[in-house]
Amino acid sequence: MMSALMSAATPTTTWYLVLSAVLFGIGTVGVLVRRNPLVMFMCIELMLNAINLSFVAFAKRMGDIGGQTTVFFVMVVAAAEVVVGLGIIVSIMRKRPGATVDDISALKG
């Protein structure tokens, strides 16, 4: 009886993919609904992490290290993006505390 309960509670690839889809959906809704650049930036990072979770789940399922290697490179690029993007967003928000994405898009040169 205990063995049946343990196998039912063991997370499968499907659980991770459903969690990944929920996280990606939350990130997508956040990007589409919110106008604050910082919140949108965090939602994009949430979407990247959801994709990373699905890569790791598939890599574990297939027994291949390729998905985990891809996640490593995605995380490196995301870290570089955070450094540059967050610096730009914070400097804009310091000068204009109530700035929205529509205001920032007017800065195109």
Image (cartoon, rainbow, N blue to C red):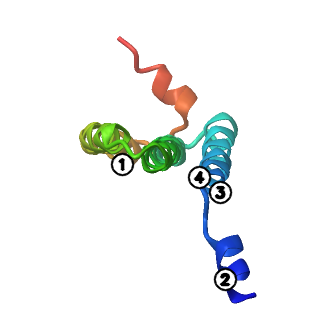
Is 36 placed left or right of 49 in the picture?
A: right
Between marks 1 and 2 in the image, the one whose residue lies nearer the viewer = 2
Helix or strand or loop: what does disc 1 sit on?
helix
Observer able to see residue 90: yes
Quick one: label 1, few (<14), some, or many (20+) residues within 10 Å? few
The answer to whether the residues at label 1 and label 2 have Cβ atoms under 8 Å apart is no
Q: Identify residue for label 1.
A: 94
Query: Is residue 9 placed above or below 16 in the rendered structure?
Result: below
Q: Identify residue for label 4.
A: 13
Which of the two discs, 4 and 2, labels the residue nearer the N terminus? 2
Helix or strand or loop: what does disc 4 sit on?
helix
**Residue 6 position by quadrant:** bottom right
Give the spatial CA distance, label 2 vs label 3. Answer: 19 Å
| Residue at 49% in and 48% down | 61
| Outermost residue toward the top in this view | 109
Give the spatial CA distance, label 4 vs label 2. Answer: 19 Å
Query: Which quadrant of the rendered structure holds the C terminus?
Result: top left
The answer to whether the residues at label 3 and label 4 have Cβ atoms under 8 Å apart is yes
Between marks 2 and 3 in the image, the one whose residue lies nearer the viewer = 2
Between marks 4 and 2 in the image, the one whose residue lies nearer the viewer = 2
Which of the two discs, 3 and 1, labels the residue nearer the N terminus? 3
